Amino acid sequence: MAYLYIPNGVNLHHWRPSGTASSYKMGSSFTSMEKHREDFQIFTGFEQKNATNGGDGPGDHARGTAAFLTSARPRKTSGSDIQLGISADQVAANAVAAQTRLPSLELSTDGVRKSGNCDSGYSCAYQFNLSWRSENQPMTPESNPRAVFERLFATGSSGERATSLGQRLASKKSVLDFIQSDAKALHRHLGRTDRRKLDEYLTGVREIEKQIEKAEAIGIPADPGVAAPAGQPDSFQDHLRLMFDMMVLAFQTDTTRVSSFLMAHDGSNRSFSEIGVNEGHHSISHHQGNQDNLAKLAKIDTFYLEQLSYFLDKLKTTEDVDGKSLLHNSMIVYGGCISDGNRHNHDDLPILLAGNGGGALKPGRHVDLGENVPLSNLYLRMLEEFGVNEKRFGDSTGSLRKA
C-alpha cells in the first residue's frame, strides 16, 4: 500500500468526473490516466473534518498535511509540544514489520523540517511530515533518491553491497551499545520534559536495534539490478519519477510493503516552468475565480496526474511473486486534504484509489458516496484488506464497503 499526497487543492471543474459507475467520463485533467481506466477508481464525497479549523483559526495547509493520513486534529503549537496521532500507513507497517527489511518507506521532494512556525502558529513538523509513528513522533521522509536507494540496498556497486551493509550494521550496533548505558545514567538527572524527549530518542534507538536484528536474520538485500541514482535531479518531474522508481524497487524486492510520498507539502509555492506555469502553486491556488489562474491550476493537476500515470505504468509492468502485477496486488491512494485552494475546504476531497488490492477492490469506476464520508473509512477498509484487524481508525464511522 502507498499513499501519495498532492498540495493546495485542484481545479475541480477539470478534476470532477461526470456520471458514475463504470460508464463515467473523466475530467480533462485525467488525459494521461485514460489508459489506466480499469486500474483505479475515483471517489466523490470524502472529507477530513480534523483538518478544518475547529475554532483554531487559520492554518489549513499545516492541518491538511497533518490530518491526511492520521485523521486526527493537530494541536495548534509551533513549539515542541506537538500532538497528532498515528497515521494509517504506520498502523499497517506495525502489523507487517517483522516480515520485511524495512517496516515502511517515507518519501518527499521537500527538505526535512521538524520545528519552527510554518503556518499560522502550526509547527513545521505538521506541514512537512505525512507519516506519524505516534502522536508526537513524525516519520522523517527522505527526499534524496540516492539516499533512498542506499537505505534499501546499501552503498557501493552491486558486488560490494553485502559487505557495505554488514559494515554499516556492525558500526550502528556498536554505537547503540555505547549510548544505551550513558543514556540510562543521564535519565536520572533530567526533569520531566527532558525525560520525555530522551525516552522518545531511546525509543527510536530501540527501533533501530530491532531493524538491525531483523536485517541480520533476513540476510543481505536483494540486488535490484540497477545502479544507484546520482542524487537529486534539477527537474521536478525527474525527481518525482526517481522517487516512484525507488518505491517500485522497494515493493518488487519486498524490502517493504508500505510507503508514503509527500509529492509536495501543502502550501508549497513551487513554480512549474517546464509546463509554462511560472507563478507559485500556492499563490495561484487562491484563484478568486480568475480564469487564467484556474487554467494554470488545471495544468499543474494534469502534471501531477501524469506522474501518477508513470508510477502505475511501472507497477503494472512489474511482476509480483504470484505472477500478478505489482499494481494488481497494491492499494495506492492519491489525493490531497484540500479540495478548492481558494476556499481551503476539506470536504469533496480529490481522492482516487488505484490497484486491485489482490482482487479485493473494484477499480474502473467513479464512486459518488452521496454524502460526506470520513476519509478514515477508506483507510479502515484498506487496513482490513491488508490483514490488520482494527475496529476504528481516527474519526472513522465504519469500514468503507463501496471501494
Image (cartoon, grey):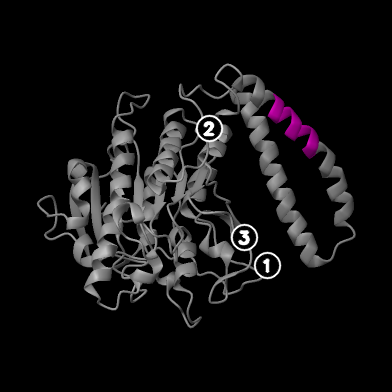
Residue 379: image location, x then y, percent: 39, 54
Q: Label 1 to label 3, Cα distance in Å?
A: 9 Å
Res. 393 in view: yes
User: What is the crowding at mark 3: few (fewer than 14 residues within 10 Å), some, or many (at least 20)?
Assistant: some
Determine whether the residue tagged by mark 3 lies in a helix, strand or loop. loop
- Of residues 82 and 322, the one drawn nearer to the viewer in this rendering: 82
Q: Label 2 to label 1, Cα distance in Å?
A: 34 Å
Type of residue at label 3? Lys
| Residue farthest left in this picture | 23
Q: Magenta span has 26?
A: no
Residue 99: which disc? 2
Q: Are marks 2 and 1 in contact (CB under 8 Å)?
A: no
Image quadrant where residue 157 sits = top right
Type of residue at label 2? Gln
Question: What's the magenta region?
Answer: 167-176
Residue 80: which disc? 1
Q: Quadrant of the N terminus?
A: top left
Image quadrant where residue 164 sits = top right
Q: Residue at x 32, y 60 (%)?
A: 277
Residue 114: which disc? 3
Determine whether the residue tagged by mark 2 lies in a helix, strand or loop. helix
User: What is the crowding at mark 1: few (fewer than 14 residues within 10 Å), some, or many (at least 20)?
Assistant: some
Q: Label 3 to label 2, Cα distance in Å?
A: 29 Å
Residue 13 left/right relative to 337? left
Residue 53 left/right relative to 44? right
Of mark 2 and mark 1, the one earlier in the sequence is 1
Q: Residue at x 59, y 25 (%)?
A: 218
